[in-house]
Image: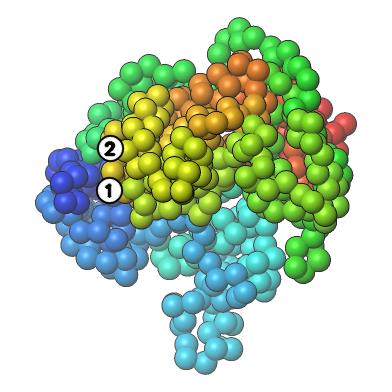
């Protein structure tokens, strides 16, 4: 019998008091696609980082194609035929695609000769795999799907026969995802071994031959895809049954009064590129509005304008009884006073200060509230700590330690802490909630919890705007969906009319009539 492409036996890895991998064994047959799934902190990324040489195991053995391997660094992993495609592309944007592939692996000291040799190899590789990339274009000019192909091509150029893919579809449209899967199936059928780390269980079912589920650093399920279902995988990951997607028979929203209205918002960046091109929308009481679209099509800028973090160059915004124009635009402090809360897309950059204790992060933006500050401006630290403990209890933030640094919580618990801060505002309970990428990097148990909280706010009469690159999330949450493409609203669909295919066509630039 052919030796497995990867065999990891009894892998142990500890970081201080945390046991990240507990006697983990994994066998991946050559020429197959193998899924690795689990909640945040389950140990799957640590395990793959050991395989790629980022970390060294404290115990256990690794065999690659039947030979024991001591992988002490990524260079050694590459030499063993292991490649890794990271979730966040590892590309130098001003350089051409060809130069990115060649960087660090130049076959000749003369640059011109090296480029010619690399081009010849890449053209043959692209013909064999179907991974077509414009080699002479700067990476910054390539669409997201082509950048993904470039990352895979870069790994294959370096001789990868075992390819680790970390959340490979995080920023792709459904059409780009399907095109990627066609390529991955072709690579698998040609003998490349694929290890897929993803939160998207549907993708595991669609692509993989086998799956390993990890929980709390240990393997809790390992077997062929044919022996499991989506619900079984979700339950194995979390340790209990979870409700994913839109519940059967879920009530249809009955929108009420307009709580926020934006008209003809326009904004150009420093290079004159229109990032918002006349965007208009209305958020009504008792509904969740989803905004779908490939990242970089104006969603981030729209959230910044609506939350008061930036001002447009044209357009108006009505929030409650107040109207704002670019000359006197909304600011975050006024937004909070008017009942608008904002959970930013990037919680690390805009939502928290990672070295701060949880209780400090949990009161950011509200630290001048009379509840938390004296008349002389002194912070009421004991009150803040107590309020944070209550937030943690209400939003199931683990561990429940207000003194722990924000950086030491998992992604899901960081997100729940930021959401709790905004939803439980100390003075004016929010009636409008803007949420960017509510479950990015969040495990399946936390996804279920966060979705439940957003629905609860809607059911209490609030207006919720959700921007997400995950179509499953939009379809699970939204009552109405807007699709953004190149800074404009490309179409609007009631949830009853939404399918992944229809949304994907709008995301790719089709008009609303063609997408319906």
Q: Which residue is mark 1?
A: 47
Give the vertical position of 396 relative to 144 (above or below): above
Outermost residue on the top side: it is: 249
Q: Residues within 10 Å of mark 2 (few under 14, many from 20)?
A: some
Which residue occupies 76% across, 17% down? 256
Residue 313 is left or right of residue 10, and the answer is: right
In the picture, the disc for residue 195 is none
Q: Nearer the viewer, residue 234 or 448?
A: 448
Mark 2 or mark 1: whose residue is earlier in sequence? 1
| Residue 478 appearing in the image | no
Considering the numbered disc 1 on the image, is that residue within a helix, a strand or a loop?
helix
Quadrant for the N terminus in the image:
top left
Q: Nearer the viewer, mark 2 or mark 1?
A: 2
Residue 514 is left or right of residue 28, and the answer is: right
Q: Nearer the viewer, residue 89 or 301?
A: 301
Where residue 174 appears, x then y in whole percent? 64, 38
Give the vertical position of 216 relative to 2 (above or below): above
Considering the numbered disc 2 on the image, is that residue within a helix, a strand or a loop?
loop
Where residue 488 appears, x then y in whole percent? 81, 45
Which residue occupies 61% across, 24% down? 477
Which residue occupies 74% across, 24% down? 284
Q: Nearer the viewer, residue 103 or 325?
A: 325
Q: CA distance from mark 2 to mark 1?
A: 28 Å
Outermost residue on the bottom side: it is: 110
Q: Which residue is mark 2?
A: 401
Q: Residues within 10 Å of mark 1 (few under 14, many from 20)?
A: many
Give the quadrant of residue 355: bottom left
Quadrant for the C terminus in the image:
top right
Residue 295 is left or right of residue 108, and the answer is: right
Where residue 3 appears, x then y in whole percent? 24, 48
Where residue 409 appears, x then y in whole percent? 33, 43
């Amino acid at each position: 019998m052919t030796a497995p492409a990867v065999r990891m036996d009894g892998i142990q890895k500890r970081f201080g008091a945390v046991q990240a991998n507990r006697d983990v064994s994994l066998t991946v047959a050559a020429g197959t696609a193998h899924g690795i799934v689990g909640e945040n902190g389950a140990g799957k990324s640590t395990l793959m980082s050991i395989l790629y040489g980022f970390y060294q195991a404290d115990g256990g053995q690794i065999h690659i194609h039947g030979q024991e391997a001591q992988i002490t660094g990524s260079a050694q992993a590459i030499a063993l035929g292991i490649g890794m495609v990271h979730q966040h592309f590892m590309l130098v944007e001003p350089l051409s695609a060809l130069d990115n592939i060649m960087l660090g692996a130049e076959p000749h000291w003369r640059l011109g000769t090296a480029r010619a040799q690399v081009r010849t190899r890449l053209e043959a590789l692209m013909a064999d795999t179907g991974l077509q990339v414009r080699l002479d274009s700067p990476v910054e000019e390539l669409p997201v799907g082509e950048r993904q192909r470039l990352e895979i091509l870069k790994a294959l150029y370096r001789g990868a026969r075992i390819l680790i893919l970390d959340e490979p579809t995080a920023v792709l449209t459904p059409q780009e995802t399907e095109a990627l899967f066609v390529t991955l199936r072709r690579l698998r059928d040609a003998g490349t071994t694929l290890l897929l780390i993803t939160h998207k269980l549907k993708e595991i079912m669609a692509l993989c031959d086998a799956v390993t589920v990890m929980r709390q650093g240990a393997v809790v399920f390992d077997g062929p895809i044919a022996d499991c279902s989506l619900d079984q995988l979700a339950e194995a990951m979390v340790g209990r049954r979870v409700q994913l997607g839109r519940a059967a028979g879920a009530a249809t929203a009955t929108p009420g009064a307009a709580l926020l209205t934006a008209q003809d918002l326009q904004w150009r960046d420093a290079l004159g590129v229109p990032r918002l091109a006349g965007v208009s929308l209305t958020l009504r009481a008792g509904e969740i509005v989803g905004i779908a679209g490939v990242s970089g099509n104006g969603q981030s800028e729209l959230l910044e304008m609506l939350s008061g973090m930036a001002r447009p160059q044209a357009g108006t915004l009505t929030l409650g009884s107040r109207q704002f124009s670019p000359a006197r635009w909304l600011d975050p402090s006024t937004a909070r006073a008017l009942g608008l809360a904002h959970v930013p897309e990037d919680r690390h950059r805009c939502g928290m200060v990672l070295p701060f204790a949880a209780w400090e992060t949990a009161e950011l933006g509200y630290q001048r509230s009379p509840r938390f500050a004296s008349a002389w401006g002194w912070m009421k630290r004991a009150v803040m700590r107590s309020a944070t403990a209550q937030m943690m209890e209400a939003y199931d933030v683990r561990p429940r330690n207000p003194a722990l640094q924000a950086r030491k919580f998992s992604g899901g618990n960081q997100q729940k802490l930021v959401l709790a801060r905004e939803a439980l505002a100390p003075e004016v309970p929010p009636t409008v909630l803007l949420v960017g990428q509510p479950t990015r990097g969040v495990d399946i148990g936390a996804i279920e919890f966060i979705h439940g909280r957003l629905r609860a706010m809607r059911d209490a009469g609030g207006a919720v705007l959700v921007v997400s690159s995950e179509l499953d999330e939009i379809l699970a949450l939204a009552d109405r969906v807007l699709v953004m493409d190149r800074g404009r609203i490309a179409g609007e669909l009631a949830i009853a009319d939404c399918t992944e295919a229809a949304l994907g066509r709008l995301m790719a630039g089709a008009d609303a009539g063609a997408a319906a």
